[in-house]
Amino acid sequence: MNAVNIKPQSAADRAKEIVEDFNSWAKAREAASDWSDYVNQHGKLNRSKVAGECGKRGFATSCFRTNLDLKHAVVALEVRLAASDQLKASRPAQKAINQATDDLLVKRLTAAKVSAEARAKELEEKLAALKAQLHDQNETLKTFRHPDDHLSSTGRLLRP
């Protein structure tokens, strides 16, 4: 066949081929038991290394995000490997991850505290303004209470 008569491969067919390549690669790695060569410092499979070694021509690392079947297969493999303690983050990396998480948590809590204090101050100012308004309304009510009582009991207005 010449190059003109070759039918191009559809994206769906290529996606299936990539998943098959990944599954056969995983079986080969299972037989060789060399998972430690493919684990990065965060305790996950090194996707660029995996993508380069799968099949005859490999595939792009973006396939791990766009090909749902491949994504599920990788996650399932990582869960299985983690359950058998073959995927572990290195101690320094885990320490760095924990430190970064702690720092982020402290920042979030500090931001939440500042926000809550600002809201409390705003509410206190609003409460003070409402108390002042209530006091003014009560004074106005006292001014007009006597004439109103007289009008309701006698039916006549007071002379000024």
Image: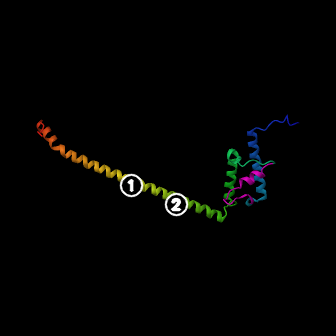
Q: CA distance from mark 1 to mark 2?
A: 22 Å
Foreground: disc 1 or disc 2 = 1
**Residue 96 located left or right of residue 45:** left
Rendered-image quadrant of the N terminus = top right
**Residue 107 located left or right of residue 47:** left
Q: Nearer the viewer, residue 140 or 68?
A: 140
Cβ atoms at labels 1 and 2 below 8 Å apart: no
Which residue is drawn at the image coordinates 62% and 64% (left, top)? Answer: 95
Queried whether the magenta region covers residue 81, the answer comes back as no
Q: How is the image coloured?
A: rainbow
What type is the residue that disc 1 sits on?
Answer: Lys
Residue furthest top in the image: 5
Q: Choose top left, top right, bottom left or bottom right for residue 145.
A: top left
- Return the disc, 1 or 2, that comes first in the chain's sequence: 2
Q: Nearer the viewer, residue 81 or 45?
A: 45
User: Residue 147 location, x and y as percent?
Assistant: 15, 41
Which residue is drawn at the image coordinates 61% and 61% (left, top)? Answer: 97
User: Residue 128 location, x and y as percent?
Assistant: 32, 52
Rendered-image quadrant of the C terminus = top left
Residue furthest right in the image: 1
Q: Which mark is residue 16?
A: none
In the rendered image of this protein, does residue 79 appear above or below residue 140?
Answer: below
Provide the residue designation for mark 1: 121
Provide the residue designation for mark 2: 106
- The magenta stretch is 37-55
Secondary element type, mark 2 = helix
User: Residue 69 location, x and y as percent?
Assistant: 69, 45
Secondary element type, mark 1 = helix
Q: Nearer the viewer, residue 85 or 7?
A: 7
In the rendered image of this protein, does residue 14 appear above or below residue 43?
Answer: above
Residue furthest front in the image: 160
